Amino acid sequence: MLQVSFIRTRKEQVIEGLKKRNFPEKDLQIVEDILQLDDARKQVQAELDQALAERNTLSKEIGDLMKQGQREAAETRKSRVATLKDAAAMHEERKKQLENQLEELLLRLPNIPHESVPFGKTPDDNEVYKDWSKPLPQLPPDALPHWELATKYRIFDLELGVKLTGAGFPVYRGQGAKLERALISFFLDEATSAGYEEIIPPLLVNEDSARATGQLPDKEGQMYFVERDNLYLIPTAEVPVTNIYRDEILNESELPIRLTGYTPCFRREAGSYGAHVRGLNRVHQFDKVEIVRIEHPDRSYEALYEMLAHVESLLDKLELPYRILRLCGGDMGFTSALTFDFEVWSAAQQRWLEVSSVSNFETFQTNRLKLRFRDADKKIQLAHTLNGSALALARIVAALLENNQTPMGVVIPKALQPYTGFEMIV
């Protein structure tokens, strides 16, 4: 959530940033509406403060007058105190109304893009930040897509998932289950070796947690909701892991904080249809290892590029061709200031598959989280948050199966073999 002070001092920057995000022109009035509501809130606050100050002064005078036996003067002031009490209550109620209206508008505003974010409306407008420089793997004409390899080698079963739950819930089995578990362990070990503390968080979060990291109200329709308990199944470990530090004031010496967590992730993916969502390309439940960082504002972009390097190292070790995209304004997530997507090459499908997003949210999440730190001058300020997929497994599995298929079976990358216990899926 943007700070009102930021909107007030950088109004034109905010408007231009919203335009870069393709925010509807007719809705840009929201910026002025926010400032007007804030002005009204300040006015009511001033009137409330004035009423309370006068009431306190009169209350003290009443005590003195009573001691001096000036009952008539004291009663006059009591009458005024009663009036001021009613006025203060009215101002307090009006202030709460204005604050609620202000928060409602602020929650509708996305983050302002970093200056490096390119203009654009669709994924086609994303910028290739780093392209794959080597030849892409070439497969024979009879190569199979991963969903057919899954049937051939009994790796995962989508139809069984339909029987147990519904479409989009794969069941991994045999060597496929071991491959999934191996990838999770490999990604977690790589993260902890890089200095991230491992977290096992809950898979359900309350409304406050979902709102604090920006899933609500923006992605409400994409999350599974347990109505009876008012809890949400997490769409990513980012939500519970980042919320560990909600309502916290850290010392500057505690920064940076690096956290990693493995969780299943649950997404409704409403409206996803077509050939490009076959197999593991788009599912409702998938495993993912997330990395989260809480950083000093002065070095959050340095941290962002460190996270990019970490994800790159994972893909290099898995021997997967990849490219990195800098997302355009129209394709970025609601909460992000700058996002890079990693895509791996699916040789059998002849297309790129997104496997990771790495983002800097600057103060957008921490303003909602009330996640602050005390700097060297004892001044309290908002920290920056970042996160990234390191990595999302479903499409990683798809690419590994397709790119490494041979007539004898599917070859396991060397870095992963100590985790699987086998060199080939047969």
Image (cartoon, rainbow, N blue to C red):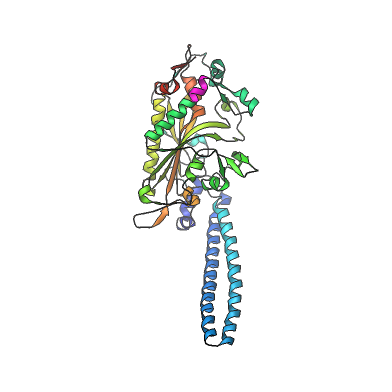
- The location of residue 308, given as percent across then percent down, is 40, 36
Please state which of residues 19 and 420 is positioned toward the viewer in this rendering: 420
The reply to whether residue 308 is in sight is: yes
**Where, by quadrant of the figure, is residue 152 drawn?**
top right
Residue 202 at x, y = what percent? 53, 39
Say whether residue 259 is magenta: no
Q: Position of residue 390 (x, y in %)?
A: 44, 33
Compared across the picture, whether 222 is left or right of 387 comes to right
Q: From the viewer's perspective, is residue 30 above or below residue 302?
A: below
- For the residue pair 8 and 146, the one nearer the viewer reads as 146
Residue 413 shown left or right of residue 146 in the figure: left
User: Residue at (49%, 33%) from the top-left corner?
Assistant: 288
Instruction: Quadrant for residue 387, please give it.
Output: top left
Q: Residue at x 34, y 57 (%)?
A: 377
Which residue occupies the extreme front position in the image? 67
* Residue 268 x %, y %: 60, 35
- The residue sitting at 41% across, 22% down in the picture is 418
Q: How many marks?
A: 0
* Residue 131 in sight here: no
Which span of residues is magenta-colored?
Answer: 173-180
Q: Main secondary structure of the magenta part?
A: helix
Q: Is residue 103 above or below residue 338?
A: below
